[in-house]
């Protein structure tokens, strides 16, 4: 075995380029596979464990106390589909905006609960103690993440008691933001009743929907104000990392496929080029199995090294993605499952060895005499008939000879073509992903050149949005809200004006506190709509697709919002093309109903064509000094940057690896055909013509590779882009999927030629420069 290792080690040193290629492609493939499988299997595991340990509810519901009694709500737990229930608990939304800014949230969804335990939603009191007397409150903070308030702080409620913070608790289902005793809740005038359910079957959305229908059967039609499934929460938590999974899985599979092709090509070429070495080894006493082992070890060494480094890299990259995804719900137990790393460490070398096995078996089956004679006997070449036909075509002789070269080794040419096809497919898919990400970013955060947003003047305690320069003193308004809007419309240069008021509201039956953005004036300046129509009344609302999907709702469904004691049931009439899930869009009449005295936070102005924007802004600010023009937001989200950067890096690496596969093929062809090249040069072919011939042989494969790879890449994109959007809880927008155009497809088709030419030109020039005497020395 020692002799086998010495020969294999010498072969690795002798073929350094091929060794590096195998190591790099296995490293990239392993890292991508570990990252994809790690995110796929780990994305929801911490939540599942915590949900099971705390007996988390499958459905959190909120009922209207004016429409249904506690006894009726309690009776819903008797349904056969319910395996366990907790409640009814009285619930109220506490206004805490007047507490000196200690608490970041403007309101607290608070539940009256006697103890943290129970059959459903067992709370983790991780600091302090549970509230046991009136005047005490427990806040829902994530373990290990201190908030702006501490144990012992006090919360003063408008026209109500002062509550002392006695502890912090955590609910895996986020069923509430604070808890008090039932007796204390009775003094807080609760308007909602909370009920928590666990169902016998809750694996799918259909199971949850069936359970929801069962527990609400027989209750008044508008008794249920809201309900939230644990599946929606689970998907929301995992969505930050899940968006990468479809993208990474495809690139990982492509990487493995390229690795298999490169390894099969390298070993096949090594066997063909090493016939004489194989014969000599067998003549020296190596058994057929030992010869086969030499070739398997030759690829196993770099593949094992690449696999180990790739596994480490995949784990390192996955860790921050998982941590970011789960930091919002308090789990620190996030890492790639051990079995994923073990599978990669064992599986990738096995795949590489299987790719090399056919060629290694070929070396095993050769006898010593056959191998030595095959390595020294002259060959006429299997492309002779095709080359004779091509010789009759009106093409330069170097080009016609080059077009016939791939037919001399059809198996090797097939492997090289497959590598080029995968390279083109990778480029096409990556370009499509980048265009999709860019199209989505431009749609949800458009950079309008004909618009400006002006911050409204300060009122009351201060502006509702941060000014452009916080160090500058705020300027009080000199005009009313309506007069400001009239000023903006009457100043020359304005085509459309919309006033925007923003208020935080609570979505009843959900943990969500969202920003309600109401528009007055030209609603065309509102966000782009995917489906539906712009809200026109106080009972209509438009929502982002992420909010819709996260809540398990659809256009036509209703939600109930609450602000400062006023509750409104709203019909969802449209889906907006916006990214944040925590925004709702409505007509100004809704704000008039919730907060009649509020004035606009900002104004959006669209300019007439050719208007001087700077002159307009100066004129407006001179008439109303409190108005302040805001700069364009611009920039990209971190997720978009990661996706585009990942696509770029993986494209460059896999494209380079495909080019290295072509490089290896040209090297092997040049070595095998050195006698033919010497003869061609001896009869007058110039080094430039030899280079053209060798490059043309691969360029032809590049053309075919482009024609096959582009449609495969487009087809993969049509699957990957929608899967990424669904993983992000977004609707599948057509403008994100349909990003390819004919000129772009033509350019992408040329990627195959570029990969082939880049891989062929260096070894072709090297072969062309070898002197004739050196080539024919041994002939």
Image (spheres, grey):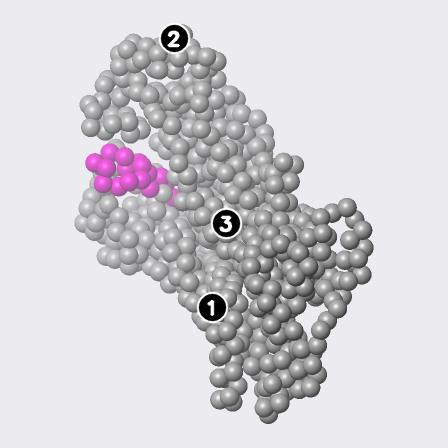
Q: Are marks 1 and 2 in contact (CB under 8 Å)?
A: no
Q: Is residue 290 magenta?
A: no
Give percent across and percent down for residue 679.
67, 64
Picture quarter containing residue 597? Answer: top left
Q: Is residue 542 above or below residue 195?
A: above
Q: Which region is colored magenta?
A: 90-108
Q: Which residue is mark 3?
A: 647
Marks 1 and 3, how far apart in space? 21 Å
Give percent across and percent down for residue 309.
43, 67
Residue at image location 50% in from the left, 33% down from the top: 443
For residue 30, side relative to residue 744 (left or right): left
Q: Secondary structure at mark 3?
A: helix
Give percent across and percent down for residue 712.
66, 50
Marks 1 and 2, how far apart in space? 66 Å
Other residues around mark 1 within 10 Å, as few (<14) / some (14–19) / many (≥20):
many
Q: Which residue is mark 2?
A: 491
The residue lying toward the viewer, choosing from 713 and 603, is 713
Other residues around mark 3 within 10 Å, as few (<14) / some (14–19) / many (≥20):
many
Q: Is residue 136 visible?
A: no
Quadrant of the image containing the C terminus: bottom right
Q: Secondary structure at mark 1?
A: helix
Question: Considering only order in the chain, which callout, 2 or 3, is on the residue closer to the N terminus?
Answer: 2
Residue at image location 39% in from the left, 61% down from the top: 316
Q: Which residue is mark 1?
A: 306
Q: Secondary structure at mark 2?
A: loop
Residue at image location 75% in from the left, 62% down from the top: 383
Marks 3 and 2, how far apart in space? 47 Å
Q: Which mark is residue 494?
A: none
């Amino acid at each position: 075995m020692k002799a086998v290792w010495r020969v294999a080690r010498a072969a690795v040193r002798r073929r350094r380029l091929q060794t590096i290629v195998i190591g790099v492609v296995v490293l990239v493939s392993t890292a991508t596979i570990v990252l994809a499988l790690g995110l796929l299997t780990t994305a929801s595991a911490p939540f599942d464990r915590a949900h099971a340990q705390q007996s988390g509810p499958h459905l959190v519901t909120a009922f209207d106390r004016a429409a249904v009694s506690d006894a009726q709500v309690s009776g819903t737990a008797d349904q056969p589909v319910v395996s366990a229930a907790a409640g009814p608990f009285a619930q109220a939304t506490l206004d805490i905006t007047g507490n000196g800014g200690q608490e970041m949230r403007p309101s607290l969804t608070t539940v009256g609960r006697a103890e943290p335990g129970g059959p459903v939603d067992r709370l983790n009191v991780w600091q302090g103690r549970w509230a046991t007397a009136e005047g005490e409150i427990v806040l829902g903070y994530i373990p290990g993440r201190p908030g702006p308030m501490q144990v012992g702080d006090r919360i003063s409620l408008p026209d109500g008691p002062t509550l002392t913070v006695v502890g912090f608790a955590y609910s895996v289902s986020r069923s509430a933001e604070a808890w008090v005793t039932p007796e204390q809740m009775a003094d807080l005038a609760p308007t909602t009743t909370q009920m928590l359910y666990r169902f016998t079957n809750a694996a799918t959305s259909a199971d949850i929907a069936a359970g929801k229908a069962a527990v609400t059967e027989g209750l008044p039609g508008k008794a249920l104000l809201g309900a939230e499934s644990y599946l929606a929460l689970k998907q929301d938590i995992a969505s930050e990392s899940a968006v990468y999974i479809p993208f990474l899985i495809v690139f990982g599979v492509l990487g493995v496929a390229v690795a298999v092709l490169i390894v099969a090509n390298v070993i096949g070429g090594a066997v063909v080029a090493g016939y004489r070495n194989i014969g000599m080894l067998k003549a020296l006493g190596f058994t057929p199995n030992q010869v086969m082992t030499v070739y398997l070890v030759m690829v196993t060494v770099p593949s094992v090294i690449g696999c180990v480094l790739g596994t480490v890299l995949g784990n390192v990259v996955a860790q921050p993605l998982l941590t970011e995804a789960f930091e919002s719900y308090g789990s620190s137990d996030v890492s790639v499952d051990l079995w994923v790393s073990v599978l990669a460490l064992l599986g990738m070398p096995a795949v590489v060895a299987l790719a090399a096995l056919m060629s290694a078996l070929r070396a095993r089956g050769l006898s010593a005499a056959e191998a030595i004679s095959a390595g020294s006997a002259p060959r006429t070449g299997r492309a002779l008939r095709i080359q004779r036909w091509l010789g009759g075509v009106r093409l330069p002789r170097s080009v016609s000879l080059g077009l016939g070269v791939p037919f001399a080794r059809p198996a090797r040419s097939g492997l090289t073509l497959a590598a080029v096809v995968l390279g083109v497919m990778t480029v096409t898919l990556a370009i499509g992903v980048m265009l999709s990400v860019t199209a989505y970013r431009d749609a949800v955060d458009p950079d309008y050149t004909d618009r400006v947003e002006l911050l409204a003047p300060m009122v009351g305690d201060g502006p509702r949005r941060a000014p452009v320069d916080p160090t500058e003193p705020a300027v009080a308004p000199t005009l009313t809200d309506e007069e400001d809007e009239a000023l903006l419309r009457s100043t020359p240069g304005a085509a459309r004006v919309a006033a925007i008021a923003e208020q935080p509201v609570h979505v009843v039956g959900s943990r969500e506190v969202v920003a309600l953005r109401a528009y007055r004036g030209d609603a065309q300046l509102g966000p782009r709509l995917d489906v539906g129509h712009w809200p026109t009344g106080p009972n209509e609302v438009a929502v982002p697709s992420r909010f819709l999907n996260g809540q398990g709702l659809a256009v036509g469904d209703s939600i109930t919002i609450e602000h400062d004691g006023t509750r409104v049931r709203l019909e969802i009439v449209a889906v907006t093309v916006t990214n944040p899930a925590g925004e709702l869009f409505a007509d100004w009449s809704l704000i008039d109903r919730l907060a009649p005295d509020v004035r606009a936070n900002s104004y959006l102005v669209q300019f007439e064509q050719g208007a001087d924007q700077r002159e307009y802004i100066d004129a407006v600010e001179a008439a109303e000094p409190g108005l302040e023009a805001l700069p364009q937001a611009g920039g990209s989200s971190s997720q978009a940057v990661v996706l585009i950067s990942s696509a770029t890096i993986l494209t460059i690496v896999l494209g380079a690896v495909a080019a290295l596969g072509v490089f290896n093929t040209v090297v092997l062809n040049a070595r095998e055909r050195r006698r033919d090249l010497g003869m061609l040069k001896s009869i007058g072919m110039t080094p430039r013509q030899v280079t053209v011939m060798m490059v043309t042989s691969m360029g032809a494969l590049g053309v075919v590779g482009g024609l096959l790879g582009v449609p495969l890449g487009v087809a993969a994109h049509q699957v990957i882009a929608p899967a990424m959007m669904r993983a992000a809880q977004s609707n599948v927008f057509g403008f994100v999927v349909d990003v390819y155009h004919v000129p772009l497809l033509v350019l992408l088709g040329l990627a195959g030629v570029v990969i082939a030419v880049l891989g062929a030109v260096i070894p072709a020039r090297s072969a062309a420069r070898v002197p004739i005497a050196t080539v024919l020395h041994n002939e």
